[in-house]
Amino acid sequence: MFTGIVETTGKVVNLEKIEENLTISVSAPFTDELKIDQSVAHNGTCLTVVDINPEFYTVTAIAETLRKTNLSELKIGDIINLERCVKVSDRLDGHIVQGHVDQVGTVKSIENQKGSFLYTFTYEGNHITVEKGSISVNGVSLTVVDSKDNSFSVAVIPYTWENTNFKFLKPGNIVNLEFDIIGKYVQKLYIPK
């Protein structure tokens, strides 16, 4: 489990396609603190550490993960958002984020609002958002400002903009979306498909 409070960013240093899987090697400030089998969220996608070197660690994304996330779009040198899993004794500062990306969305627009940034995203499918509800975008826990059918907006404070890969996003970019877990259960129970 994660909180959606991005711990740091990392740099993709190697990508290797092995059959249908993609191994991703990442240089990160906490590499020397990791252990094999530990979970780390990469742009909000929970992946297991499979190898550790002094300069980087490696994870594997399987075909299902690559189909549902933006990880298949990664290039060497890309900056990704990283969060290690929550310890039971930690505060839950964001919201409950499983690291199980539901789907991708697209950056529709970015507006500089003189003190914050308003990002609008579009997506396909039947997932729902609600104003003042939670959403995870590239692993960042955010509050929905404006909710419409197949689109939503979020306000990003300067700290989040500076300390995540949001500062590199542009209209048309693909992002990972994890919808609020409570909303998904409500939708499953009460909203016909």
Image (cartoon, helix red, strand yellow):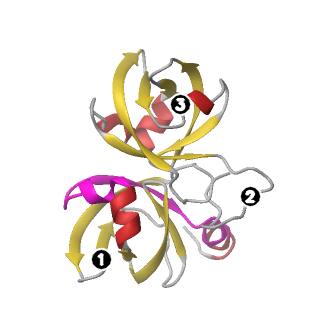
* Residue at disc 3, secondary structure: helix
Q: State whether residue 108 is above or below residue 71.
A: below
The C terminus appears in which quarter of the rendering?
bottom right
Q: Is residue 168 left or right of residue 30?
A: left
Number of numbered discs overlaid on the protein picture: 3
Q: CA distance from mark 3 to mark 2?
A: 20 Å
* Residue at disc 1, secondary structure: strand
Dot 3 or dot 2, earlier in sequence: 3
How far from the left and from the top, in percent, is residue 59?
A: 51, 27
Q: State whether residue 77 is above or below residue 114.
A: above
Q: CA distance from mark 2 to mark 1?
A: 30 Å
Q: Which residue is mark 2?
A: 90
Q: Which residue is mark 1?
A: 118
The magenta stretch spans which residues? 164-185
Q: Amino acid at mark 2?
A: Asp
Q: Which residue is mark 3?
A: 31
Camera-side residue: 73 or 77? 77
